[in-house]
Image: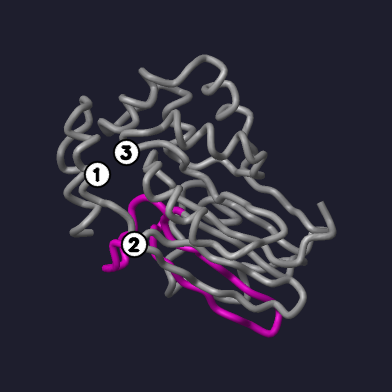
Amino acid sequence: MTEATRIGLLSDIHANAVALRAVLDDMEPVDALLCAGDIVGYGPSPQACLNMVRDRSIPTVVGNHDRNVVRGMTWESGDEYARRVLSTDDLEWLEDLPRELQLFDERLKIVHDHPDEQDRYTEPADFSPTLLEDEDVLVLGHTHIQHAETFDDGLVINPGSVGQPRDGDPDAAYGVVDLSDLSVDLCRVPYDIERVQQRIEGTSISGRNGERLVFD
């Protein structure tokens, strides 16, 4: 995968198919899509979200919720639900996800959390050129906080959470990076949150997971 210029960035989908569809419909044409992990967890539609990612062959790295669901270390109700409803094939696909990917002639690295330490949060205050190695663009997720910074050595980007933002804006978040000029657009799109909350009510998932779609 070397020819792409405009790259759509997804992260922290968290089994929110309504938000993911809104993002995919809203995004202007791109040459490729990437996902920084946590397809599952918290939300009511793990199967639908996995299908959308798999059907599009979107290169994806493993998130902590993805890993927990595979291992049966389900510490929250959305993880427990995903573990119960996903097929063996789905779980095997999640298990095979890599910790990081380097793509586009190694100009872009994508990892869920922190390039040096699994499960470590990389908050906006932690963005610095020391996170970059030889790549021009580092893409991160995990915090659910949309943020990007440009340094002399390149870009560090968190496209934000598709399915459960935690930066005070409940709209679904995503990003688009242009490798030709190392620019990035951080985007938001509204979606039907009430519909997702209603879906959660019809499952074993805690109602708190629906509430935080609005209040986190």
Residue ranking furthest to the bottom: 152
What residue would you read off at disc 1?
195
User: In the image, what residue type sits under mark 1?
Assistant: Arg
Q: Where does the C terminus fall, quadrant-wise? A: bottom left
The quadrant holding residue 30 is bottom right
Asked whether, in this view, residue 14 is left or right of residue 10, the answer is: left
Asked whether, in this view, residue 76 is left or right of residue 198, the answer is: right
Residue 31 image offset from top left, x and y in percent:
72, 59
Mark 2 against mark 3, which lies toward the viewer? 2
For marks 1 and 2, the one nearer the N-term is: 2
Q: Secondary structure at mark 1?
A: helix
- Quick one: label 2, few (<14), some, or many (20+) residues within 10 Å? some
| Picture residue at 54% right of the left edge, 38% below the top | 52
Inter-mark Cα distance, 2 to 3? 17 Å
What residue would you read off at disc 2?
190
Q: Secondary structure at mark 2?
A: loop
- Quick one: label 3, few (<14), some, or many (20+) residues within 10 Å? many
What residue would you read off at disc 3?
43
| Picture residue at 47% right of the left edge, 35% below the top | 66
Q: Is residue 122 above or below residue 59?
A: below
Q: Which residues are magenta?
A: 142-171
Q: Are marks 1 and 2 in contact (CB under 8 Å)?
A: no
Judging depth in this view, the residue of 93 and 162 nearest the camera is 162
| Picture residue at 31% right of the left edge, 25% below the top | 80
Inter-mark Cα distance, 3 to 1? 12 Å
| Picture residue at 17% right of the left edge, 33% below the top | 201
Residue 212 image offset from top left, x and y in percent:
21, 52
Mark 3 against mark 1, which lies toward the viewer? 1
For marks 2 and 3, the one nearer the N-term is: 3
Q: Are marks 2 and 3 in contact (CB under 8 Å)?
A: no
Judging depth in this view, the residue of 189 and 155 nearest the camera is 189
Q: Secondary structure at mark 3?
A: loop
